[in-house]
Image (cartoon, rainbow, N blue to C red):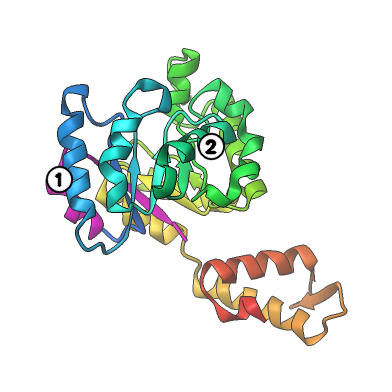
Amino acid sequence: MLRSLLFVPGDRPERFARAAASGADAIILDLEDSVALAAKRDAREAVAGWLGERRSCRVLVRINALDGGLAEDDLAAVLSGRPDAIMLPKAEGAASVDGLWAMMGDMAVPVLPIAAETPAGVFALATYRDCADRLAGLTWGAEDLSASIGTIGPREVDGSLAAPFETARSMVLFAAHAAGVEAIETVFPDIADATGLATRAERARRHGFTGMMAIHPAQVGPINQAFTPGEEELARAREIVALFAADPGVGVVQLRGKMVDLPHLRQAQALLARSGDVAAQE
């Protein structure tokens, strides 16, 4: 389960170990937007060198977009280090994943597409279930999508996402679940707003996202907390599974005076499975 994924600029190797020790489930060593063109070569060397060291968490590498002439060099530098996945920006459906997979050849690793950074990417979301076995999840990017369609910004004055971006967010969520892969919420850009981050992360989990990206180590703890089920929630899920296990032929049971049916059972099993709870297998 990927609750938190922490971005680290690929040209800042002094930050790699700190990021890995932050408590994040994965770190994303970035070769794209956070690295200036003149620094790309040094960043590739830094990332490739660090991939050879012992890892305390999963490590993804965000390469440059496939159509920018830089992705091939990124892959040539990092694939021998066997990252856990490649993050693909500006992805536009299964065709982009297939193109990246072909470029990786025998050294292919799972792909985490940033699946809604362009209008074409939004319209291609349904195709990800055709390549689900190659995916590490799906995520999206509000800022790049905003730039792609020429808006002033993706958020309203009160900080909430504007309607077009809420639509894209929801479509990525549905596409991830249709493909049966992790649904990863985009970043919360205000590092100083811990309350806003907690609210956004809790909202994402309520909506069905399974994790969220971070841009600073201080964001990792609140994200992990939001996406970690509490004991009360786990206990209720175990009760639901046990009630149905006690009477396998029934479609509806009662739990403390409330009706619980098969969709509730599936939700409970999924929650326990993500938490590694053996009750989900009963």
- Amino acid type of the residue that numbered disc 2 sits on in the rendered structure: Asp
Viewer-nearest residue: 65 or 249? 65
Q: Secondary structure at mark 2?
A: helix
* Badge 2 or badge 1: first in the primary sequence: 1
The reply to whether residue 199 is visible in this rendering is: no
Q: Is residue 88 left or right of residue 258?
A: left
Seen as rendered, the residue at the extreme front is 106
Disc 1 is placed on an element classified as helix
Mark number, residue 98: 2
Residue 31 inside the magenta-drawn segment:
no
Q: Residue at x 51, y 73 (%)?
A: 276
Q: Residue at x 52, y 31 (%)?
A: 116
Indicate the position of residue 149 as horizontal and vertical percent values: 50, 15
**Quadrant in which residue 277 is drawn:** bottom right
Which quadrant: the C terminus? bottom right
Q: Is residue 129 above or below residue 34?
A: below
Task: Sort mark 2 into few (<14), some (14-19) or many (20+) by Cα contacts within 10 Å.
Answer: some
Q: Which residues are magenta?
A: 1-21
Residue 229 is situated, as x and y percent measured from the top left of the image, at: 50, 67
Q: Position of residue 152 (x, y in %)?
A: 43, 15
**Tag of residue 13:** 1
User: What is the distance, in whole Å, between disc 2 and disc 1 at their CAs?
Assistant: 30 Å
Q: Position of residue 85 (x, y in %)?
A: 40, 49
Q: Residue furthest bottom?
A: 246
Residue depicted at x 82% and y 81%:
248
- Disc 1 marks a residue whose amino acid type is Pro
